[in-house]
Amino acid sequence: MRPTLRIEDPRLSLPTFVWLVNISGLRHSVNMLDTNPTSPGHVLAVLRAEGPLTRQELQERVGVSRVTMVERLDALRRTGLVRRVGHRESSGGRRAELLAVDDTGHTALVADIGQSHATLAVVDLRGNVFARQDLRLSTRHGPHETLPMLVDEARSLLSQSGRAESLCAVGLSVPGQIDHDAGVTTAPPTMREWGGVRLRDPFADAFGVPVLLENDANALALADYYAMGRPKATVVGVKVGTGIGAGLVIEGRPHRGETGSAGEIGHMRIEGSNQRCSCGRRGCVAAEASGQALVRTLREHGVRSVDDVVRWVAGGRREAIEAVSAAGRLVGTVLATVVSIVNPRYLRLGGAVGVLPPFVEALRATVEANAHASALRKLDIAASQLGDRGAFVGLAGLVADEMLSPTTVDALCRRL
Ligand SMILES: [Zn+2]
């Protein structure tokens, strides 16, 4: 992020300008101005959490006079973030206008970057997809070849979508840990050359908007959390693709831990295994149950890739179904411990292997047999219903949380 340079750039749209102020080093000074719990930004937050609502309902919830609420709504209408969505019949026969947050006018460019695939999409802040492109990445190429290519592809996708004018942020999900302050990745062992990469910079330079980063399993957990309508519940998302990772959403926020490694379950040790793992140690769950491990297990039968594993299971090949079930049992053993410690309401499974029915069933049976009984009482285990849109929905929601936060909205209102 280079705040001074960009903030003075006259080509920036106003929302971008304000958002850069918010996300850059000036954030703390902006926050100091934003302590009024009845500000336009807070009104929008109430509308986002509880809307659609009438003006009077908003007045009662925020606790302000009619005059103040009219002022707040005027300020919000100028931002384009509130719209009329119909009427509510009132007892006196008068029809009161219903208001809701309009999160469809702003655009985010999102990318889910994996070891062998990347998917780019142009979305609104609800996760509606306007354009997408799937790319196969060469494992021979490191980030220095791959990132400029992704930026070029993203630029042309954005231009084809016709929504470039309303771009407000880029969101990227990657396996492994992220240093959120520095925008640097700590690569998983299977993508060693991606360690220490300044992932944010090429996208920030190309698009001139803030770039948010998230671990892919956190993005999956967030996606299911948003898709379920932001329940007041803890969500654990587990992604089993080439590697294995988990993400936690607690009270609506990703729980990243002190060093960004919360949920890194792939390298937990399993009793009795001596299999060498890509991390250099032996006996990790990823060495036995990841997509990469399944390819190794099934290689003698002709399997060459995780895509082959998926095709073989869909085709009913017995050896593939047995190997995938065994993987589900191993990951389930680890997750039984996670469930006992975290006591989540929802456990959602994603990734190419994670959504395969034999994997889900074996995992569910193992968790139910091994986790603490009271931690199981409300637990809902299922494959994510979002398919390969999951990362987009999660990243769009992250962008929305930042873009529609009271601080950002109040800063925007002060500029209009
Ligand atoms: Zn390992």
Image (tube, rainbow, N blue to C red):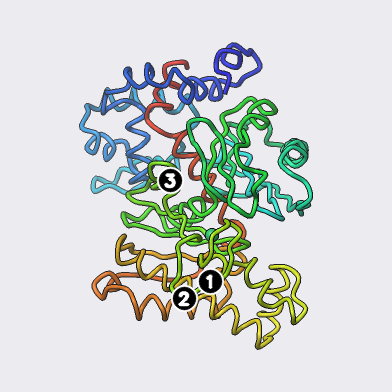
- The span from disc 1 to disc 2 (Cα, nearest Å) is 7 Å
- The span from disc 1 to disc 3 (Cα, nearest Å) is 63 Å
Secondary element under disc 1, as helix, strand or loop, is loop
Q: Quadrant of residue 110?
A: top right
Local packing at callout 2 (Cα closer than 10 Å; few below 14, some 14-19, many 20+) is: few
Q: Quadrant of ligand 1?
A: bottom right
> Residue 5 vs residue 228: left or right?
right
**What is the total number of numbered labels drawn onto the structure image?**
3
Visible residue check, residue 350 = yes
Does the Cβ of the disc 3 residue fall within 8 Å of ligand 1? no
- Give how far across and how far down residue 319 sits, in percent: 66, 86
Residue at 50% x, 69% y is 383
- Disc ID at residue 86: 3
Q: Of residues 303 and 192, which is closer to you in this image?
A: 192
- Earlier in the chain: of badge 1 and badge 3, it is 3
Local packing at callout 1 (Cα closer than 10 Å; few below 14, some 14-19, many 20+) is: some
- Earlier in the chain: of badge 2 and badge 3, it is 3
Q: Identify residue type, mark 2.
A: Gly
Secondary element under disc 2, as helix, strand or loop, is loop
Q: Nearer the viewer, mark 2 or mark 3?
A: 2
Where is mark 1, residue-wise? Answer: 274
Residue at 45% x, 62% y is 268
Where is mark 2, residue-wise? Answer: 272
Do callouts 1 and 2 mark residues in contact (Cβ within 8 Å)?
no
